[in-house]
Amino acid sequence: MSVNGTASTNGSGSKASANVQWGGRFAGGPSAIMQEINASIGFDKAMWKQDIAGSRAHAEMLVKSGIIDGESGTAIAAGLEQIATEIEEGRFEFSPLLEDIHMNIEARLSDRIGEAGKRLHTARSRNDQVATDFRLWVRDAIDGVDAQIEALIRSLATRALEYADAIMPGFTHLQTAQPVTFGHHLLAYVEMLSRDRGRLADARKRLNECPLGSAALAGTSFPIDRRMTASLLGFDRPTANSLDAVSDRDFALEYLSALAIMAMHLSRFAEEVVIWCSSPFSFVRLSDAFTTGSSIMPQKRNPDAAELARAKTGRVTGALVGLLTVMKGLPLAYAKDMQEDKEPVFEATEAMALTLAACDGMVRDLTANTNRMRELAGSGFSTATDLADWLVRVLKVPFRTAHHVTGRLVAMAEERGVDLAQLSLQDMQSVEAGITADIFSVLTVDASVASRTSEGGTAPSNVRAQAEKWLKATEA
Ligand code: ARG
């Protein structure tokens, strides 16, 4: 059999010869179905860069520690470089017979440089190798996602500044509650996303220990220098327990947990975009760039990007639950079950990247219908709390009593089919004699939002300051 793992078939065409990397004690090869269930090359080739980086660091350390000779080390480094080029240029033939990315690259190395290549796997195992590669991959993914979140935060803050004075109805229970500003609403998502960044940064910190040198599960008798490989690969330190190091996938789970929470946040944003774009609301318009038409109803502009962003949550949460289920109950140390760790992480990463990009696109694209928002902001007696607050502030009425008085005024206005501001002073005084004309100054939506200057409140002055703070924090 050739070193790159080409199958030599028997009569039935279903049997391969033994794996060249570990076939010493095997007379025959795996059945076709065994090969199919066993091979991970179809997806773990995504980690080729990390695998080559890990091997380069390992070889350098083996030389420095006197475990292999310098000449072999040089040949390995050059060989790995060439393999990287082959893969980059699409010339590398990935073989399922060699199971995974680790054996594909190692076999190709021996193919190219002979004896020296066969020395690379000294003092390591695929178990610490895959744990290292995967940590490196997730670390890169965290950095990529983080940059995208930062960009989205910037876009939200930019629009928030633009709409710092745009008054809209604020809702609780999706019922008109109190007027807020659109800028304030957008900045709420900035806060969520910044916590998402925090969770990712936190996961990254705990992830950043190097499993390489844990070998199969017990460590190695070779005088390796784990600090050296850890630092060459940008890890803070080597992992402390070899059994834990090869069986731990917390880093992937923490990453997925952070993504799942973020996907949930983005699904809420997407849902609001869907609601805002609906014709009964008409708060926001997305351009042709972020909507689709209907094949039958010519008037439709469907917010498909928002709907799909809302739906991607399913994949991301599914990935988290899937991997938690794979890991549940696994005895120490490595078990092949753990090969099922990568696809959910890859899939969630792809879904998240697309969702973040779509949300960023929509945030930049949307136009708020500020007249419509303002009109609805004043409906539904949205300044009733302002009225009650005036009674407390000016007449020194206890809040609970003020609430009651206001309730009676709302009932009166409702009965007459008018807004609170349309009641006459006389009407007001029939419920609470102490009321003066000054009360009308707090019943406008502008007065309402302008008065909410408490820390974290919706006043335009607050919103401007917060938006500027975020723009500064995300400056390139
Ligand atoms: N392809 C394997 C995985 O992704 C690599 C580790 C295999 N280790 C082993 N002892 N068979 O988990």
Image (cartoon, rainbow, N blue to C red):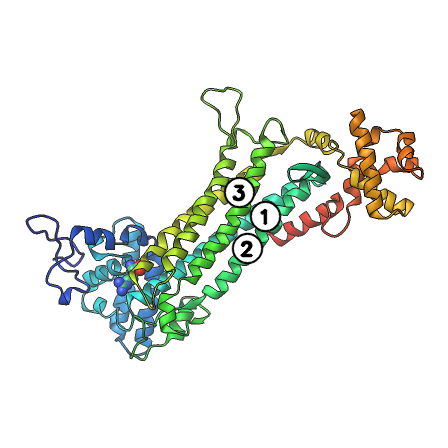
Q: Is mark 3 within 8 Å of ligand 1?
A: no
Q: Regarding mark 2 in the picture, which secondary structure is present there?
A: helix
Indicate which disc residue 197 carries: 2
Residue 350 horizontal/vertical position (percent)? 42, 47
Q: Is residue 400 left or right of residue 172?
A: right
Mark 3 Cα shell of 10 Å, populated few (<14), some (14-19), many (≥20): many
Q: Is residue 144 left or right of residue 342?
A: right
* Mark earlier in primary sequence (3, 1): 1
Residue 432 horizontal/vertical position (percent)? 90, 38
Foreground label between 2 and 3: 3
The one nearer the camera, 376 or 119, is 376
**248 w.r.t. 471: above or below:** below
Does the rendering let one see residue 285?
A: no
Specify the quadrant of the image occupied by residue 410: top right
Q: CA distance from mark 2 to mark 3?
A: 17 Å
**Residue position marked by numbered label 3 in the rendering:** 267
